[in-house]
Amino acid sequence: MQSPDTPYVNIAAYKFVSFDDTAEKRPEFLAFCQQHNLRGTVILSPEGINLFLAGLRPDIDAFLAWLRADPRFADLIVKESYSEKQPFTRMLVKLKAEIITMKHPLIKPELGRAPFVEPRELKRWLDQGHDDEGRPVVMVDTRNGFEVDVGTFENTVDYRISKFTEFPQVIEDHRADFEGKTVVTFCTGGIRCEKAAIHMQNIGYDHVYQLEGGILKYFEDVGGAHYNGDCFVFDYRTALSPELKETQTAQCFACRAVVTPREQLSPDYVPGKSCPHCASAQRKGEETQETASAQA
């Protein structure tokens, strides 16, 4: 719930929809956001829109009213969280071929979206240990490894990918592992797991759903049931708890690794300069150089 101590509204939203006039719309988006002191990123693509924005409540509401006046975005679903300060440093409106890069031309908005399961229904499945047809439910994390390390669902399948473009091949290679099971893909806000679910359908998965609204919507609707840890987010807050509150987790400015509160106690952690992860990598590099020199 928003309070006077958290005046900034952070919104995340996406929609797959045919959007052919992105170049014409870009300056309009940028001008409106700048006029209303919004910061963040809006991605415009022929396959739809993806956005992460933050601002004061009147400005966020004005933006959503303006955007939803376009019939293509009238039903845009938005996830909200709150912060005491502006989490973004600038306002960007980008034109891209895809609203989330997968390098697979899978999304055809006119054909409809991927099958999905609502957070409350997913919790019920996880509570009972199977879906309503008796199939075991398997959670598949579509995020990068460093995001997963901050928190994920219990007993999730995590392929330790370093970028989303790796997902199509790895999930195809493991298709036999999911025979007779219901697969639920998930991510931070829903966009990656929707693309993942479409790809899995296309390569022959029979029972696959995306988690509607991703982890953030799950937190909003049911809290942290069946989830361990927090959720990584791509702004200064770094991670949100199941209560959608900022945590003490940080991200290293030097190597971009996630640094837990415990790791922040290390003498190797210097905010804005270094952390135990990059310090360890540096020491290993120095040891390798010393070994190479000794063998020369």
Image (cartoon, rainbow, N blue to C red):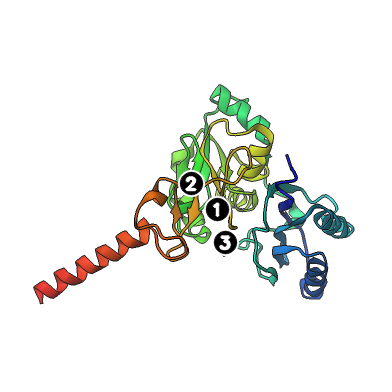
Q: Which residue is drawn at 39% across and 49% down?
A: 265
User: What residue does disc 3 label?
Assistant: 102
User: What residue does disc 1 label?
Assistant: 238
User: What residue does disc 2 label?
Assistant: 150
Mark with earlier residue (1, 3): 3
SS of the residue under disc 2: loop
Q: Which of 5 and 237 is in front in this view?
A: 5
Q: Are marks 1 and 2 in contact (CB under 8 Å)?
A: yes
Identify whether 147 is placed above or below 95: above
Tell me which amino acid carries mark 3.
Met
Q: Where is residue 110 in the image (x, y as percent from the top left)?
A: 77, 56
Q: Where is residue 41 in the image (x, y as percent from the top left)?
A: 68, 64
Left or right of 40 on screen, residue 153:
left
Tell me the quarter of the image containing the C terminus. bottom left
Left or right of 251 on screen, residue 276:
left
Q: Are marks 2 and 3 in contact (CB under 8 Å)?
A: no
All told, the count of numbered labels is 3
Q: For label 1, count other residues whose C-alpha is less than 10 Å away and answer few (under 14), some (14-19) or many (20+).
A: many
Mark with earlier residue (2, 3): 3
Left or right of 275 on screen, residue 109:
right
Is there any visible trace of residue 131 in the rendered image? no
Is there any visible trace of residue 285 in the rendered image? yes
